[in-house]
Image: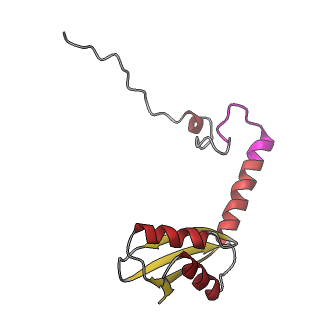
């Protein structure tokens, strides 16, 4: 017996963008209740976030000793536990020298990074 497909393709339409909002749903700027004060607040929040992002420090470290994804996860976890660290990205070179990029509110002391690497396992700054 043949089957009939009764599903519908739903259009991808950003209705919030049509109302002047971004449509992400997270900031509320696309909500149905827009007032001058909330628009102003959203603009101020976006400006504050952009300023804070510009104040962040990004450093890339050469790290040896990592051989797999588990190693990269351990390093990422330890570095993210340091005060002020907001992001860690590992470019893994298994058995070689990997690049670890750390974004933080303040510059990190190299001894802090070295201690975190030691805590994560047998990893060292190159």
Identify the residue shown where x is 56% and y is 74%.
102
In the displayed structure, would residue 76 be above or below residue 19? Answer: below
- Is 96 in front, or is 86? 96
Q: Does the magenta-highlighted stretch encompass residue 73?
A: no
Relative placement, left or right, of 46 versus 91 is: right
Identify the residue shown where x is 36% and y is 20%.
7
Relative placement, left or right, of 46 versus 66 is: right
Q: Quadrant of residue 86?
A: bottom right
Relative placement, left or right, of 48 versus 100 is: right
Q: Quadrant of residue 21?
A: top right
Q: Does the magenta-highlighted stretch encompass residue 34?
A: yes
Q: Quadrant of the N terminus?
A: top left
Indicate the position of residue 17 as horizontal and vertical percent values.
57, 39
Indicate the position of residue 43 as horizontal and vertical percent values.
72, 52
Indicate the position of residue 65 as horizontal and vertical percent values.
43, 82
Q: What's drawn in magenta, residue-wise?
A: 28-40
- Is 90 in front, or is 6? 90
The kind of secondary structure the magenta stretch mainly shows is: loop
Relative placement, left or right, of 3 versus 6 is: left
- Is 22 in front, or is 91? 91
Q: From where the camera sits, is residue 59 visible? A: no
Q: From where the camera sits, is residue 110 visible? A: yes
């Amino acid at each position: 017996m043949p089957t009939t497909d009764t599903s519908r393709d739903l259009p991808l339409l950003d209705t919030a963008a049509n109302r002047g909002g971004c449509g992400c749903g997270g900031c509320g700027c696309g909500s149905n209740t827009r007032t001058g004060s909330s628009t102003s607040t959203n603009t101020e929040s976006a400006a504050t976030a952009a300023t804070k992002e510009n104040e962040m420090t990004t450093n890339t470290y050469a790290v040896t000793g990592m051989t797999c994804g588990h190693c990269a996860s351990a390093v990422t976890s330890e570095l993210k536990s340091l005060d002020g660290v907001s992001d860690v990205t590992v470019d893994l070179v298994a058995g070689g020298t990997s690049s670890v990029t750390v974004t933080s509110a303040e510059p990190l002391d190299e001894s802090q990074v070295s201690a975190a690497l030691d805590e994560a396992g047998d990893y060292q700054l190159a």
